[in-house]
Amino acid sequence: MKIVVTGSIGHIGKPLVPRLVANGHQLTVITSKQQNAPVIEAMGAKAVTGSVEDVNLLTDTFSGADIVYTMVPSFYGAADLLEFYRSVGENYAEAIRQSGVKRVINLSSFGAHLSKGTGVILGAHYVEEILDELENVQITHMRPTSFYYNLLSFADMIRNQGFIAINCGGNDLIQLVHPDDIAAAIADEAAQPGTHRKIRYVMSDERTCSEIAAAIGKEIGKPDLEWRLISDEEARNRYLQAGVPPLLAQYLTEIYSSLHNGKLAEDLVHHRPEYGKIKLEDYAREFAVIYNGKNN
């Protein structure tokens, strides 16, 4: 099949593109960076350089595709992240209408069923709503859980303070996922018959914050590493003191608050997927390589 992949070769695209090529699909990858084009072509795919904010480019690239994989790239330089999600979602919808694409696999997020209180994840909710308005298009919303690599945001805190402290901690459960497992799920979905509307969760492991801290601590030589639970207010103040813009600080606080109170996972628990291959202990070794590299 002819498949268009957005999101270039980032965390998910890098393992996804070779999988789809190996499965015999004809791939076109949209990338915003010209320097990625040779890498993409070396993987066996065609590279198209441009922006997901360019509806004409999207329409031209989507034309003739059997499946389009959509995702909203991270753009923390946007004045309003949620508006950026809306804008990209509308661009995708318009390009899908104009090009006549009949099947979409959309990267969303767990928690996308909620219409408030989830920080940046609310953007995934908006995109799902926008795409669901399309008529005669089969759509699968992939809802991965919390990415393992988000734990790297705590590296400096661990190094400088010797512990992790946010408004989610202790015995709170976090559902974790590795990009490789997401790529595997997307490739599997592409091999399945399409349906009108489908939600598919992706999760690699599920552990308490204390268990996560213990696994990471073991690998970085800090076996007593703690993950402390603090209040929303204290967490927000910490972000602000670190120079995080106020709106982003609010979004981050909301995300961890919704992890703490279980809201993000409330729909997932009723539609639990099989675990992926990469467990916490596997990722802890990846974390340690990066953490120790930064220490050198």
Image (tube, helix red, strand yellow):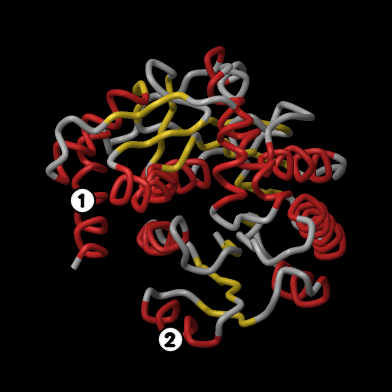
Q: Which mark is residue 10?
A: none
In primary-sequence order, the first of circles 1 and 2 is 2
Residue sitting at x 73%, y 26% = 114
Residue type highlighted by circle 1: Ala
| Residue 22, placed above or below residue 264 | below
Position of residue 276 measured from the top left corner of the image (x, y, whole percent): 34, 34
Of the pair 211 and 16, the residue shown nearer to us: 211
| Residue 158, placed above or below residue 35 | above
Q: Which residue lies under the disc numbered 1?
A: 288
* Count of numbered circles in the view: 2
Label 2, secondary structure: give it: helix
Residue 67 visible in image? no
Residue type highlighted by circle 2: Pro
**Picture quadrant of residue 100:** bottom right
Packing grade of label 1 (10 A; few <14, some 14-19, many >=20) is: some
Camera-nearest label, 1 or 2:
1
Position of residue 241 measured from the top left corner of the image (x, y, whole percent): 57, 50
Of the pair 128 and 162, the residue shown nearer to us: 162
Label 1, secondary structure: give it: helix
| Residue 199, placed above or below residue 142 | above
Residue sitting at x 78%, y 54% = 89
Of the pair 264 and 7, the residue shown nearer to us: 264
Q: Which mark is residue 38?
A: 2
Is 174 left, or right, of 76 in this rendering? left
- Between marks 1 and 2, how big is the CA–CA gap? 30 Å
Image quarter where the N terminus lies is bottom right
**Picture quadrant of residue 208:** top left
Packing grade of label 2 (10 A; few <14, some 14-19, many >=20) is: few
Residue sitting at x 45%, y 24% = 229
